[in-house]
Amino acid sequence: MIHRTGPAVQTLTPINPAQSDKNWQQLLAEAVTDPQQLIQQLQLPASLLPQLQLANQQFQLRVPQPFIDLIEPGNPNDPLLLQVLPQSQELVAQPGYLNDPLHEAGSNPQQGIIHKYHGRLLLMISGGCAVNCRYCFRRHFPYQDNRLGSQQWQQALEYLRQHPEVDEVIFSGGDPLATPDNRLNQMLDDLEQLPQLKRLRIHSRMPVVIPQRLTDALTQRLAQSRLQCVLVLHINHPNEISQLLRQRLQPLRQQGITLLNQSVLLKGINDCGDTLIRLSQQLFETGILPYYLHLLDPVAGAAHFDITQARARQLAGQLTARLPGYLVPKLTQELAGEAAKVQLLPTQVTANS
C-alpha cells in the first residue's frame, strides 16, 4: 500500500449540518463501530472488508462522525483514515512489540492510578475513548481493573494525601473528556481541597474527534478552578484541525487555559517534514503550542506504524532548521523505568534541506 505523506493544500472542512444540532454525548453514542458502515460511507473498496473484520475482532473500530467528515471519501490512504482503520498488519506478531510497552503495570500502585514520575501522577478517570486509534499504547490496558468508582476515588484522594510531593494531577484514560461534566466537576471540587495541588492537566483526543465536547460549561468550570489548567490535545496531522475545533478552542484561550499538543510519529501518516511543519504552523494559528513529538510506543498490533529513531531525528532536524524554536515540539521517547521521558537530539540539517 502506498501512503500519501507529502504536502497538500489544507482546507477547513465545513461543519456538517446534520451534526450541528447534536450534543457531544449523542455523537459519542453514535460513533461508527461497524467496518462495513465505514467502508460504505467513505466509498472505499469492498475488498478491504475481510481484513477490517479480522483486525476488528481484536480491537474494535470506533470513530465518531465529526472525524469521519474530515476523511477524504474514496481515498484508502487518507492519513486520518489510516489512524482508525483496522488492518491485517495488526494481526502479525512482531518481536519487541508488547501488550504493555511502557510496563505500566509496575507503576499502578492502586486502582485508577499510574504513578511513574516525581511530582505528578495520572488518574484513569475513564476507560473509554471516542475513537480507537490503531496505534494506541493502551489498546491492551486492563481498564476493567482500574475503574474509579466512588470508593476507589476516595482511595485515590487518600493516596494523594499520603504523597504531598505530588503537585500536579493528570486526567487520563481512555479519554477523560468521555466523562460527563457533573462527574468531572465533582472530581475537580475534591482535588481543589488538596492544598498541595497546583496544576491539573487533561490529556484528551476528544476535542479533535468530537469538538462539541468543548462546552461553555466545561470551559467555565476549568476557568474557575484554583488549579492552573492545561489541556493537552493529541493531533497528528494538520487535516485534523477542523473549523469547529478552532471555534471551540477560542473560549478556552480567552479564559487563560493553556493549550498544548502532542503527536505520535506514524509511518505513512505524518513521517514527512512538510506535513509536520504544516502541523506546527496550523497548531500555532489555532492557539495551540506544539509540545511533544513522540516515537511510537512499541505496542503489540502497531508495528506497521513505526519508524526508526534515525528517521525521527532527521524529521526533527528538518523542523529545527525551518521553524522558529517555539514551533518545534520536543522529540521524545518514553522508556519503562526512566525518571522522565527521554529527549532525542535532532539530526542537524541545513535550512535548505
Image: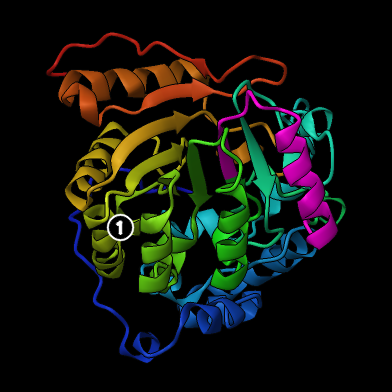
Residue at the limit of the structure toward the left, as seen here? 352
Residue drawn at x 65%, y 55% as measured from the top left = 174
Residue 155: x, y in percent?
Answer: 82, 47
Disc 1 marks a residue whose amino acid type is Leu
- List x then y, in percent, for residue 215: 39, 72
Task: Quadrant for the C terminus, please.
Answer: top left
Which residue sits at x=69%, y=62%?
Answer: 51
Residue 99 higher or lower than 87, as above or below = above
Side of 65 where 170 appears, left or right: right
- Asked whether residue 73 appears in the rendered view, the answer is no
Span highlighted in magenta in the image: 148-170
* Magenta-span inclusion, residue 165: yes
Which residue sits at x=58%, y=72%?
Answer: 182
Closest to the observer, 273 or 144: 144
**Residue 193, image x, y percentages:** 59, 47
Residue 65 at least partly seen: yes
